[in-house]
Image (cartoon, rainbow, N blue to C red):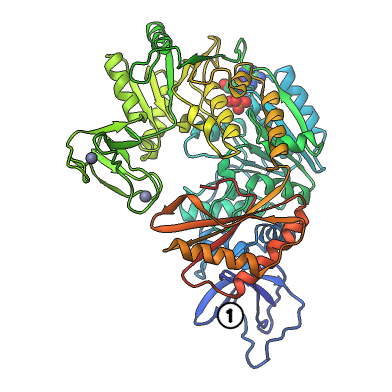
Amino acid sequence: MRIALDVPLPRLFDYAVPSGAELACGDRVTVQLGRRNQTGVVIEADITTDVAAARLKSIIDVRGDAPRLPADWLELMRFLSSYYQRPLGETVVGALPPRLRSVKPLPRKPLQLAGEPGASDFVPLHALTAEQARLVDAIGAKLGTFAPVLLHGVTGSGKTEVYLSLIARVLARGAQALVLVPEISLTPQLEARFREAFPRTRLALMHSGLEDVARTSAWLAAARGEASLVLGTRLALLAPLPRLALIVVDEEHDSSFKQQEGLRYSARDAAVYRAKLAGCPVILGSATPSLESWYNFRQGRYQRLELAQRAAAGAQLPVVRTIDLREQARDDGFTPPVLAAIAERLKRGEQSLVFINRRGYAPVLTCEACGWCAACGRCTAHLVLHAADRRLRCHHCGAEEGIRRSCPTCGNVDLKPMGRGTQRVEETLAGRFPGARIVRIDRDSARRRNALVRTLEGLRRGEGDILVGTQLLAKGHDFPQLTFVAVLNADAALLSTDYRSGERLYAVLAQVAGRAGRRRERGEVMIQTRYPDHPLFQALLQHDFARFADSQLDERRRAGFPPYVFEAALRAEATELAHAMAFLSAARTRVEPPEAVRVFDPIPNIITRRAGWERAQLVMQSGSRPALQDYLARLSATLFEEPARSVRWHLDVDPIEFD
Ligand code: ADP
Ligand code: ZN
Ligand code: ZN
């Protein structure tokens, strides 16, 4: 038997079958490796081994406590392992929930999920609009065949109802549906909506916030085919689903679908591969599709289906306009039109949302006398001032310290906060609108999840007049009484050198803007900027995503960026930058790239030091996916062969973060 084990090496291990045991690919087994017992998965059954008979150990235990891992699941793992350049053993074993990875047997009685296996009653919340119904029919006609669909629906267009109607068809056939969402723990109303739509269906919830037992139970229910509906974050893509007939990736543009450690897979891309394996449709849904998906649509690989209208009766897209910061006076960051708009909403008893992309009080604490700024000792980054608990915090590594009373360089006692974050905006608003109920929502206020969920529920009921928040607020929330959104300053992203920053800015602005006026009252959005004529804002004002996406694609094509080329990064971290750079330079010379692959010079990351590690990277590009894959395979084989001392390294295929 050839067995996959979770070791940091790209190889499999051979073991003998104990007499009388019947084993096949996909069986979980316990074996001894070195002195430790480990859980492994049988990858090849009929093999001739090079290991001498005397040295060949026997499998200790064949684990019958979970279903055999199916062939298509193993196929998916093989794809992930080879595409993302991670050892197969790590990929396969790492995809199991912790309880199934452990050599301890499963607890006798795993949690039973609610619902009945195979039940498929559907309780629609709304009669579908004509637009929705047309899409449901179009996609429904594709059930049973591989079909990638880009569901491009404006905010509030009722994409969820489209998913639910299609899922109903899948369940009626006795098959399974998989729904991936970026973040589930903050949007319990989404889970509630699914449970309400399918009250008797066995639904398996999968996300990393679940306790071990609940996670294992959900996984087993999916793998046994008992759960007909699986709803989860990216890791749900790794669950075996014997009767998979539909995959939905909601908010497909969201960067959380890309894992940023270990197996750095994109659940969105892998979902398309998985749908191909299963021969079923995959729906990528978004109001602001990723440029990769948009490109695939333009290339004719994905079919685009559009929901251009908001679904709720009378609901319209908000009116968006820019406020020119070069002309308007500013009072603590707020222009008069924005303040007036908030005041008007207060008078009418409606809610406003003030969006600012930075949490904390101020991003920098500085000495105006000598120019000193509070910096993190472990990162190339400023410490962010958190006024409420009088701390300075690093948003990259979490380090924190007390606020200094005086400048460590010149002794000046007049240290000033520079710039503004959510806490400062909250303070300003409280001063300006005494009596208004102001609710701040960011990662700091979200630390206690249950409290946050209660706050969000309260906001939906109208408890709160002004919301101040970061992009945490942008995703999927529905606040019926919210009619005004202000974006304080989005210009930093316009000036960024990251070629993805435009795409991201458009997405986040369209999503926050999309929170406004989701009922009868038409929403209004104001964006404060020094560049009111920027094409990005112009497209946003007209809700013309297609124009924006096409112009971005055009820029990418001319500059030679993805999706026109394929990209990968080799990253190294060491206690000294020179070691990381030397490692990358050596890697570059050791494996000769083919002509079709361009390997750039190693460069230090923008945030060079993080949590005490000095970081550098080597970017590779190619117009040919196979050429790049082939090169990466040779490169990683070489790197694995000679373990690097004092350097940690990894490969990132289709990277999206370069900081
Ligand atoms: P999206 O995810 O596309 O932004 P949602 O699925 O959250 O939109 O739906 C937006 C709002 O429209 C929700 O309040 C939903 O209940 C409502 N809605 C969806 N479909 C319909 C429909 N056919 N008729 C009336 N209201 C609908
Ligand atoms: Zn000073
Ligand atoms: Zn730090």
Asked if residue 567 lies left or right of residue 397, the reply is right
- Residue at the (75%, 53%) spot, across then down: 625
Name the residue nearer the viewer: 438 or 504. 504
Q: Position of residue 162 (x, y in %)?
A: 69, 28
Tell me how many marks there are.
1
Residue count near mark 1 (Cα–Cα under 10 Å), binned few <14, some 14–19, many ≥20: some
- Where is residue 158, by image quadrant? top right
Mark 1 secondary-structure assignment: loop
The percent coordinates of residue 460 (x first, y second) are 45, 22
Pick whichever, 176 or 540, lies toward us. 540
Q: Residue furthest bottom?
A: 54
Can residue 106 be seen here? no
The percent position of residue 244, horizontal first and vertical second, equals 72, 47
Question: Is residue 128 shown to the viewer in this render?
Answer: yes
Residue 414, percent from left and from top: 19, 33
Q: Residue at x 70, y 78 (%)?
A: 1
Residue picked out by circle 1: 60
Badge 1 amino acid: Ile
Give above or below for 441 relative to 52. above
User: Residue at position x 60%, y 38% from top?
Assistant: 500
Q: Nearer the viewer, residue 122 or 504?
A: 504
Q: Residue 652 appears in which quarter of the rendering?
A: bottom right
Residue found at x 33% / y 20%: 332
For residue 574, side relative to residue 170 (left or right): left
**Vertical position of residue 455 compared to residue 412: above or below:** above
> Please, is residue 630 above or below residue 383 in the view?
below
